Amino acid sequence: MNRIRINSTEGKSLLILGGKMDDILPLIPVKGLFIITDTNVMKIYGSSFPPGEVFVIEPGEKSKTLQVVEDLCRQMLDAGADRASFVLGIGGGVVCDVAGLVASVYMRGVRHAFVSTTLLSQVDASIGGKTGVNLGDYKNTIGTFRQPEFVLCDHNMLDTLPDEEFRSGMGELLKHGAIRDRNLFFDISAAADRLFARDPLLLGDFIRRAVKIKAEVVRRDPKEKGLRRILNFGHTFGHVIETHYKIPHGMAVAQGMIIAAGLSVWKGEMPHPELRLLEVTLEKTGMLTAYPLPAGVTGMVARDKKSQSGSVNFVLLRSVGKAIVRSISVTELQAFVNYYTGK
Ligand code: ADP
Ligand code: ZN
């Protein structure tokens, strides 16, 4: 088991990597525990949950709405939750995003933590204190920053994850390598077969390497004023593709990484062979789906939360393993999209 502490100006968080459910017992209250999970996780792991009131939401992105947050707050109120209560989200990214938001608004905020059950949330979503729900098609438009007290990642739980969800997590794992650790990126690809076979030791090793990157970035910039933006690599175009084609997040991010890398070359920030290397490696790892950029993509990007008065803060690469942030005007972005889509 590996413990990583994130101490930032926005609060402290303990990441317990490779732990078991029992490891959190000393960290949660005996009374006043409110568990938020989804129906799938409940079915598989409900019997090992710690004692507490359990609220179950529908699995998937459709649960990321303010209505679900309100319903959960009402259920908490009816069950007698007060300011001293503790919210424990047990599930993937959706459960963590929703439970985190509930915990940050219920009675102006109660304590909370996560047991992270998907690869995507173990390497990404559950770490860093972002909570949020969607507003129609606009992802994570309503949310807060609030660090969970701890995040337990039991890698054995990834055994029951459907293949598609696992592949989605691989996208975020690779992203961490692409932005900050060239060796990690190529090591993941080289070990892909054993990772897809869910070798828990190997998974633990790679998750630890990715989480260390994320933890360091969050520690230095908890509220995404600068450096933390690099974690959004692949996400600007990725979100558009994900929403339009309804494909898993990490697959869309992989596709988005290629487009952002194309933009990096177009802007003269990265040599072309690096783009090829990124592309070939993602392809070999089985991460690429060739979805064309949907029409109207620039407008969607401009309305994305990363856009500020006519320009977009875009994450580009200098090379595989080194991300930078550049402000790009919407006009320039449109020119790139025209070039990219061959218009
Ligand atoms: P993420 O955003 O982390 O990909 P979600 O919260 O949308 O994840 O979860 C993806 C899907 O996997 C959901 O249907 C969820 O119920 C299911 N799921 C989560 N954890 C597990 C697990 N350990 N085993 C099997 N299914 C899981
Ligand atoms: Zn993501």
Image (cartoon, rainbow, N blue to C red):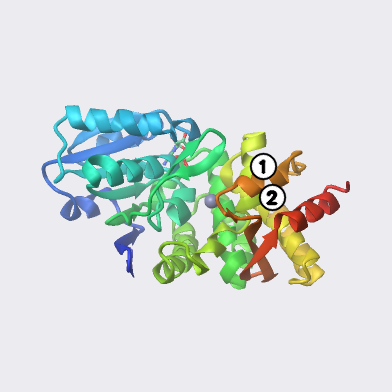
Residue 247 lies left or right of residue 288; in this view the side is left
Position in image of residue 64 (x %, y %): 44, 35
- Front disc: 1 or 2: 1
Position in image of residue 133 (x %, y %): 44, 40
Residue 270 visible in the displayed image: yes
Can you identify the residue that label 2 sits on?
255
Residue at the spot x=34%, y=46% of the render? 100
Pick the front one: 267 or 180: 267
Q: Quadrant of residue 313?
A: bottom right
Can you identify the residue that label 1 sits on?
241
Position in image of residue 131 (x %, y %): 40, 48
11 up-or-down from 157: above or below? below
Residue 159 lies left or right of residue 149; in this view the side is right
**Local secondary structure at mark 1:** helix
Q: Is mark 1 within 8 Å of ligand 2?
A: no
Residue 72 lies left or right of residue 233; in this view the side is left
Q: Quadrant of residue 331?
A: bottom right
Dot placed on the residue nearer the N-terminal end, 1 or 2: 1
